[in-house]
Image: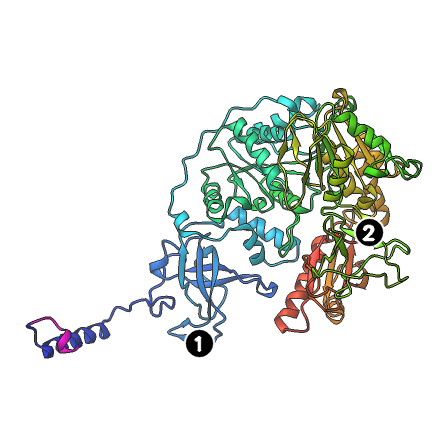
Amino acid sequence: MSSENGRPGEPAGEQAEQLAFLRETVRKAKVPRAKPRTWRGAELAKELPVARVLVDKGPVHLDRLWDYAVPLELDADAQPGTRVRVRFGAGTRNVRGGRREGGGLLDGYIVDRVAESDYQGPLAAIAQVLSPEPVLGPALFQLCRSVADRYAGSLADVLQLAVPPRHARIEAEASPEPVPPPARPEPGSWARYPTGPAFLDAVARGDAPRAVWTALPGPHWPEELARAAAAALASRRGALIVVPDGRAAARVDAALTEQLGTGRHVLLTADTGPEERYRRWLAVSRGAVRAVVGTRAAMFAPVRDLGLAAIWDDGDSSHSEQHAPQPHAREVLQLRAAHEKAAFLLGGFGCTVEAAQLVDTGWALPLTAPRERVRAAAPLIRTVGDADQARDEAARAARLPTLAWQAAREGLKHGPVLVQVPRRGYVPRLACERCREPARCAHCAGPLEARGDDGALHCTWCGLEARDWHCGECGGFRLRAQIVGARRTAEELGRAFPAVPVRTSGRDHVLDTVPDRPAIVVSTPGAEPVAEGGYAAALLLDGWALLGRPDLRAGEEALRRWLAAAALVRGQDAGGTVVVVAEPTLRPVQALVRWDPAGHAVRELADRAELGFPPVSRMAAVAGPPEAVAELIAAARLPDGTEVLGPVPLPVTVPGRPRRAGDPPPGESWERALLRVRPGQGAALAAALKTAQAARLARRDGEPVRLRIDPPDIG
């Protein structure tokens, strides 16, 4: 400080002497002051001075708890479950005063406090407690640990899925006071199932029944899920319902509000925004709210004293997490039900082979309606096969067989008609008219599509317009549509029924509901809006496009999508009719005609057992560069009897093309091998692959390899 900026009337020399005296006093102080983030010389906590911390760092070879010293000043806040910052990677040479220092700052969670560390060397101190809010309770930690072990992943990766990012302003807010538990609900529409009221009574008593529920067609399933949740709340326990998308979550949310009133449940979806979602998540974690309905991420919601874990439509691909280690909501809820001794309910209009296996092994019991009630609630199903279409020349103008056209015309007299097509867009896939060779882009070899009335061709990968196209195989210049999209179908139906409004619902614009008046609603699978009072008829077009996919689950997936659409149609007693354009002799079509999804799943399960395919066996996919895949499989101590299928080359990802989860990096040649083991060896297979992967990462040996346990697409 200079004399010019000192206080008026005070000599500059006297100021300098005072400042020097203060500096010397601070320098000679005997009580050490804790420096931020190092705590050098700081006193440690009197009790339980060691914290076991899970460092939020993803690599598998760091998947363990690390011991840190707890400074006395952080003792009150550094409790199990809180978020902290720690220094990681300092090494053993950077030690001062018996305390390890240095390293990069990383976030983490305190899992436990102990009196002594098993590690004999010097410990680093916790640098900072980010928040005293305990967000990682014992039940959630145990669940995340089990999920990481089952899917050969790291605990840090699972916690990134389970615990949302922190918002300090939201944590400072108080959560609402808990609402008293509701009264035991009446069975309501559960009375349509012989064992439905008994299931509700068991949940309300505090028992843990497990059921695979084949729901009757119609609009009652959200109300039935809400009654099951109310039964769990009546037993002074919590309830968790996981659904595939936001539209289904909104329907269950409305049913819960009607059943329970306000304040007893929260909706957890991505549409709520990060801050509001964290506010609701904290209300659940603090025990202020005991019921949750949400999409995939809600499977980890920290519901206190969980009494019911329910999932709707487990065959939907949205239930499979795309981020490592890619757990499935069904498996996570099964683990929760087992760990927390809660009831388990798996429901849907269809039935997956995994659900059929739960019943076959006795882990869960079937919850179905009598056949006479199924026939009364389901619409009339009629089929149009290839032979019927070959003889039907009169319906080409509207791309509809005569039977489908008649069903649509009759249905429009009484209400809306649903038309399901397997692809969105105008003409999504084109091929040469002469040789049927798919039309490809000359620039990147991507598939071509026609986007509108002008007939201009564009590449679906790079977006370039393809002018003067000709077939590279035969030289032809004429194209034909392999699959006709939703917008093109809507135009053709508009010409066939000029006095009827036509609406479309797909990925770009999804309708939630449509009114109960004559209209044609063209939708892609999964985007079908709910009609007030139900649709009068439904047309399921291009069934071969769903059944012909090169996938083990093609038949199951086609039946699931058909059942979801047909369940929106009025019952047979009310005149509801569904026409499916597919070969009537195929097993999924026959299951739709009989409305017997459980029977179809049982037969599929028997075929899988004979061939040794999942879920009867357990599988793991190992993908990566050929040398890396071979090295990891050779290094892993696989269980006895492990069968290695492959490896086989994966399609090369073209630069600029949209990548799916698990696709190789653009331009790289990868291979994939499938490892198959007998039932009961899945945990050993996951542990062996995880150990081998951790060893390779620790040695930094070779290229990375991607692991996926129970891959949904095995071809």
Whether residue 682 can be seen here: yes
Residue at which label 2 appears: 550
Q: Is residue 6 magenta?
A: yes
What's the mark number on residue 94?
Answer: 1
Q: CA distance from mark 2 to mark 1?
A: 57 Å
Q: Is residue 520 left or right of residue 233?
A: right
Q: Residue 332, image x and y in percent?
A: 63, 46
Which range is magenta?
A: 2-8
Q: Residue 441, image x and y in percent?
A: 77, 62
Report the residue at 73% width, 57% height from top: 458
Relative to 333, does residue 253 appear above or below in the rendering? above
- Looking at the rendering, in which quadrant would you find the N terminus? bottom left
Q: Is residue 618 left or right of residue 18?
A: right
In which quarter of the view is residue 343 placed?
top right
Q: Is residue 698 magenta?
A: no
Where disc 2 sits, the SS reads loop
Question: In this view of the protein, which residue sits in the foreground, 54 or 256?
Answer: 256
Q: Say what amino acid the circle numbered 1 marks.
A: Asn
Question: In this view of the protein, which residue sits in the foreground, 63 or 392?
Answer: 392
Where disc 1 sits, the SS reads loop
